[in-house]
């Protein structure tokens, strides 16, 4: 195995490109590790919510067979309130799913950037950069991501791009009744 020089022990073989690739790789590793940890938590929560829905349906079914009373009505009201809470939680999962998609795009982009920077033939070729940028943009599924990307590539500041993306996202917020798990 060839031992390359590093920033800690530079020699004539030292390369800022190699150091850049290392740092990009660290970033990719951190993003992917965070996504894996988050997935485990969300999977546990999903299983819990599925169990709660099943139990709630069982309670509701048992209550409907009981004679009418104030207690029955109060219990049914609690079932409705619990169902509303579960639906709100499911909406939160949608936003988590969007976050996961965004982090996946970041990870893939950082990997691709590492490969591009690491290859001298590609690094200095504007066409390769154009293709790379098109590939990044084509991965985006949300319009707000595309707007943010276009803003940055056209030279806008991070703050300007974030405002444009937030404005676009605010214009397409899902209705409360539009619950969908990915």
Image (cartoon, rainbow, N blue to C red):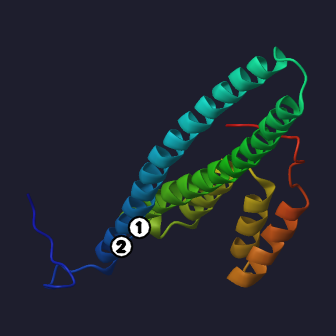
User: Does residue 140 appear anywhere in the picture?
Assistant: no
Secondary structure state at the residue bearing disc 1: helix
Residue depicted at 69% across the width and 72% down the height:
153
Position above or below: 66 against 103? above
Q: Label 1: few (<14), some or many (≥20) within 10 Å?
A: some
| Residue 9 vs residue 104, the one in the foreground | 104
Horizontal relation, residue 11 to residue 141: left or right: left
User: Does residue 88 appear anywhere in the picture?
Assistant: yes
Residue most extreme to the top: 65
| Residue 141 location (% of width, % of height) | 72, 48
Q: Are marks 1 and 2 in contact (CB under 8 Å)?
A: yes
Horizontal relation, residue 77 to residue 134: left or right: right
Which residue lies under the disc numbered 1?
27
Q: Which mark is residue 23?
A: 2
Mark 1 vs mark 2, CA separation in Å: 6 Å
Residue depicted at 43% across the width and 49% down the height:
36
């Amino acid at each position: 195995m060839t031992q390359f020089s590093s920033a800690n022990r530079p020699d004539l073989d030292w390369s800022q490109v190699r150091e850049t690739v290392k740092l990009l790789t660290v970033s990719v590793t951190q993003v992917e590790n965070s996504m894996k940890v988050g997935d485990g938590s969300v999977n546990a929560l999903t299983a819990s919510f599925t169990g709660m829905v099943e139990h709630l349906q069982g309670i509701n079914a048992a209550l409907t067979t009981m004679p009418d009373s104030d207690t029955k009505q109060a219990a049914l009201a609690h079932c409705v309130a619990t169902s509303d809470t579960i639906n709100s939680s499911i909406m939160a999962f949608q936003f988590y799913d969007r976050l996961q998609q965004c982090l996946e795009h970041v990870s893939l982009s950082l990997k691709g950037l590492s490969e591009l920077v690491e290859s001298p033939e590609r690094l200095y070729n504007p066409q390769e950069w154009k293709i790379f940028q098109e590939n990044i943009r084509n991965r985006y599924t949300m319009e707000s991501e595309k707007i943010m990307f276009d803003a940055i590539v056209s030279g806008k500041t991070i703050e300007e791009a974030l405002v444009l993306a937030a404005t676009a996202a605010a214009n397409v917020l899902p209705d409360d009744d539009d619950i969908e798990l990915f």
